[in-house]
Image (tube, rainbow, N blue to C red):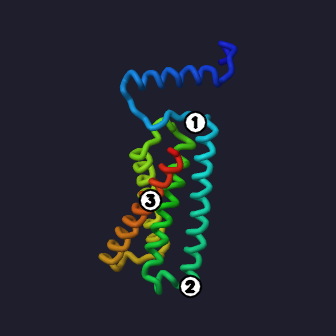
Amino acid sequence: TEKSNTSTPTPLNQNSKIFIELCKKLNINYSRFIRTTEKEHIKKSQELFKQAFVLLLMVGVLTVLAQIFYLYWTVWWSDTLLHFLSGVCVSIGGISAWFIVFDKKEINLSNILIIGVVWVIFIGVIWEIFELSFSLTFFSDGAVYLRDTVSDLIVDISGGLVGAIYANKLLTD
């Protein structure tokens, strides 16, 4: 842009026209060609991130309340609910972070699902290791520990899928 004495948007606009024409010639379909500099994209990414943050705060408060009032031991489904909500939160947060930092050309449901689920599995496994490392769970019970860990990860992934579908709806509308 300095050599051609033009503003930054000029070559970007020229290049995006080239890519749109190339996609037509190669018969590549996409739901919407989006540029990372579009105000609408920035607005939706920030909105998605804010919603993930609010959900994270809610999960944090519920976790503290569950510890204070012994809900993990008295209400059998409290751990399941928190894992599900955490999965939703991690998925939305991971997807919004991914599309803020990395290339946004491939915004479609399959990519969003993959990104969301990978984030959820990664954070879920780290959480289970954290629980074991700080004696928040006990490895000595063997089969029960394994069943609890696998069920936690399955519920995390279920929440992650819901979060990814919600993120897809918000990002592609």
In screen coordinates, is 11 left or right of 94? right
Q: Which mark is residue 69?
A: 2
**Residue type indicated by callout 1:** Thr
Residue 63 appears left or right of 154: right
- Which residue of the protein is positioned furthest toward the bottom in this rendering? 74
- The residue shown at (46%, 68%) is 83
Assign a secondary structure to mark 2: loop
Crowd tier of the residue under label 3, counting other residues whose Cα lies within 10 Å: few below 14, some 14–19, many 20 or above = many
Element carrying mark 3 = helix
Q: Is residue 41 above or below residue 121?
A: above
**Mark 2 Cα-neighbour bin, 10 Å: few <14, some 14–19, many ≥20:** few
Give the image quarter of residue 25: top left
Q: Most extreme residue toward the top, as rendered?
A: 4
Residue for point 61% across, 34% down: 37
Pick whichever of labels 1 and 2 is earlier in the sequence.
Answer: 1
Label 3 is placed on what type of residue? Val
Q: Quadrant of the N terminus?
A: top right
Seen in the picture, residue 91 relative to 82 is either above or below; the reply is above
Tell which circle, 1 or 3, labels the residue nearer the N-terminal end: 1
- Return the residue nearer the eye: 24 or 91: 24
Residue that protrudes farthest toward the front in the picture:
173
Between 17 and 138, the one lying in front of the other is 17
Query: Is 126 left, or right, of 54 in this rendering?
Result: left
Residue that mark 3 sits on: 162
Q: Nearer the viewer, mark 1 or mark 2?
A: 1
Q: Amino acid at mark 2?
A: Phe
Looking at marks 3 and 2 on the same chain, the residue that comes earlier in the sequence is marked by: 2
Does the residue at mark 1 contact the one at mark 2 (Cβ under 8 Å)?
no
* 91 over 31 or under it: above or below: below
Q: Identify the residue under disc 1.
A: 36
Q: Identify which residue is drawn at 46% across, 75% down.
A: 79
Q: CA distance from mark 3 to mark 2?
A: 28 Å
